[in-house]
Image: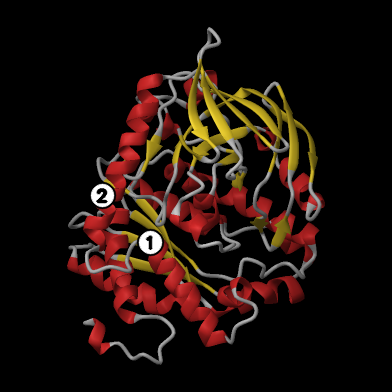
Amino acid sequence: MTASERNTTEPIDPVKLDRLAEVAIKVGLRLEPGQDLLVTAPTVALPLVRRIAEHAYKAGAGLVTPILSDEAVTLSRYRFGRDDGFDRAASWLYEGMSKAFAGNTARLAIVADNPMLLSGEDPSRVARASKANSIAYKPALERIVNFDINWNIIAYPSASWARLVFPDDEEDVAVAKLADAIFAASRVDNDDPITAWQKHNAVLRNRTEWLNGLRFDALHYSGPGTDLTIGLAHGHEWQGGGSTAKNGITCNANIPTEEVFTTPHARRVSGHVISSKPLSYQGSLIDNIAVRFEEGRIVEAKATRGEEVLNKVLDTDEGARRLGEVALVPHSSPISKSGLLFFNTLFDENAACHIALGQCYSKCFVDGTSLSPEQIAAQGGNKSLIHIDWMIGSDQLDIDGLYADGRRVPVFRKGEWA
């Protein structure tokens, strides 16, 4: 389909939507001939799911299996479901997904649901359901965070999400604006997005090579409300852009992405830090997060909004109060320049430097694919049922790389690479 064939009354440009599907298969997954693909998506994203299937089969996919969810069905559970049902999850489904990943099935997730869908529901039920789901999902999640297989996440502009991001616009206008924002961030708003991604990955690779060459012992963050030292895990390795999974396929796990990231030492974080953007989590907005770390653990946590939800998250397990990821993103990133709050971590984390509570990525270690869970823990890697990113970067943030002997190297100044 050419640009001239687009129906201008459609809020979502079908040409760019098709490009997004192609990028997901050829850049996000780099799906190999004969490889199966598991797709999860909300029903509203079916137009994108269909294009994904088409491009997957054109690339030689063995079998494409979609698993769909639905906002109305989700809300029915909270409004009419048995109370004891919120401590359960479909473990049989996740066991099947884990088995599929063990057989080299690729994983593609499409996000589109209203991020605040559950904001009006009982927060204790939301927390219980989330914890039960995290426990059930663990067998499949471990294969993802350990990069056993190639995986990718992309987004589709649903009406419910668009109304949240653009509350003052008519629905069609809001959807069109969100679609354009997603397409721009995903680099499919040009005639050759594959080449655009190759160039962008090269920039991110140069940054990771610079950081890996310096082998810092820690990072020190300073700015308004922030004085934080994050020790880096022993044998840590910076990643960004394309990453090679254990099955040998180099994939871009997140589209969009502007970050370079690595594993912090779970027991070597100290000081205090505040959030620079709200965190949308399980239907709740957590704003103005302020935490204090001692010996790697959050010992004090506050928020002007959503503090109760924040503390429930921190009590998920022992690792929930420790860091599993540290990521660097310049304040001038395209998503930051858009000025939008997407209420979705896939986008918002790429607008600012961020940290993540919970599970670390084994990929972010030298020879990480060959390390056992015990070795990862010994080198400082964190373990948890959760992995939640929240933003701490701004145009006022300075970051120094620290060596064990006290030497400092500027890494960021006023939110930009130094």
At 60% across and 83% down in the image, what residue appears? 169
Name above or below for residue 6 compared with residue 201: below
Q: Position of residue 91 (x, y in %)?
A: 56, 55
Residue 73 lies left or right of residue 240; in this view the side is right
Image quarter of residue 34? bottom left
Tell me the CA gap for discs 2 and 1. 13 Å
The tag earlier along the polypeptide, 2 or 1, is 1
Indicate the colouring scheme: secondary structure
User: Helix, strand or loop at disc 1?
Assistant: loop
Q: Which residue is mark 1?
A: 186
Q: Look at 19% across and 63% down and name the residue there.
A: 59
Q: Taking 257 as reference, is 82 above or below it?
A: below
Q: Is residue 375 visible?
A: yes
Instruction: Tell whether 321 sits left or right of 338.
Output: right
- Within the image, what quadrant is residue 255 found in? bottom left
Residue 417, position as x, y percentages in the image: 45, 36
Mark 2: secondary structure: helix
Asked whether, in this view, residue 388 is left or right of residue 96, the answer is right
| Three-letter residue code for mark 2 | Lys
Residue 215 vertical placement versus 174 (above, below): above
What amino acid type should be assigned to the residue bearing mark 1?
A: Ser
Residue at point 61%, 78% (across, down): 163
Q: Could you tell me if residue 157 is visible in this image?
A: no
The residue that appears at 59% across and 37% down in the rendered structure is 397
Q: Nearer the viewer, mark 2 or mark 1?
A: 2
- Towards the viewer: 113 or 178: 178
Disc on res. 199: 2
Q: Position of residue 389 (x, y in %)?
A: 58, 46
Please state the horizontal and vertical placement of residue 188, each as a whole percent of the image.
32, 66
Image quarter where the C terminus lies is: top left
